[in-house]
Amino acid sequence: MIVEDLSGTFNVIGHNQNAEKTTYKGILTLSLDVNKRIEAKWVIGQNQEQKGIGFFKDNILVINFNYLNDEQIIYKGVAVYKCLTKDVLEGFWSEKHGDPLFLGGERCFRVNDSYLVN
């Protein structure tokens, strides 16, 4: 695979970085900047936006992300995905204020605009 293969929209099914593994669904959009770095945008549920910048090597995608919570606190973290195919990503993530005993997890499936999980 090459980095250009990753651009597109993906349905996300994931779980949070906690003992309960609270589940969520969302949309992940990947695109490339002028330097062929990955630009990522997640929309979790109906309204939580997260953004990140990442890089790709040996079918591994790493994205440093951040978002503003309801109390206007910036949360930062990193997501790591194995790119199983250009259409299926499997990963884990951790953020600074998450429970350090656990990792979050995600599976992402490429979709066309007519079939989104949200």
Image (tube, rainbow, N blue to C red):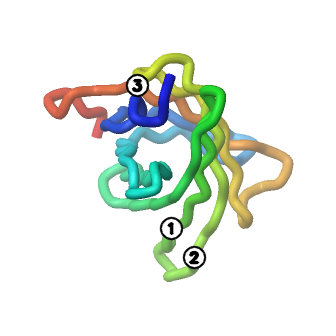
Tell me how far mark 1 sits from mark 2, CA to CA: 6 Å
Secondary structure state at the residue bearing disc 3: strand
Secondary structure state at the residue bearing disc 1: strand
Q: Position of residue 9 (x, y in %)?
A: 31, 37
Q: Residues within 10 Å of mark 2 (few under 14, many from 20)?
A: few
Q: Is residue 73 above or below residue 33?
A: below
Query: Which residue type does callout 1 highlight?
Result: Tyr
Identify the residue shown where x is 45% and y is 60%.
50
Q: Going by the picture, which residue comes out furthest to the right?
A: 101
Rendered image: mark on residue 109: 3
Residue on which disc 1 sits: 67
- The quadrant holding residue 102 is top right
Query: Which residue type does callout 3 highlight?
Result: Phe
Secondary structure state at the residue bearing disc 2: strand
Q: Residues within 10 Å of mark 3 (few under 14, many from 20)?
A: some
Query: Which residue type does callout 2 highlight?
Result: Ile
Image-based side of 21 in relation to 74, left or right:
right
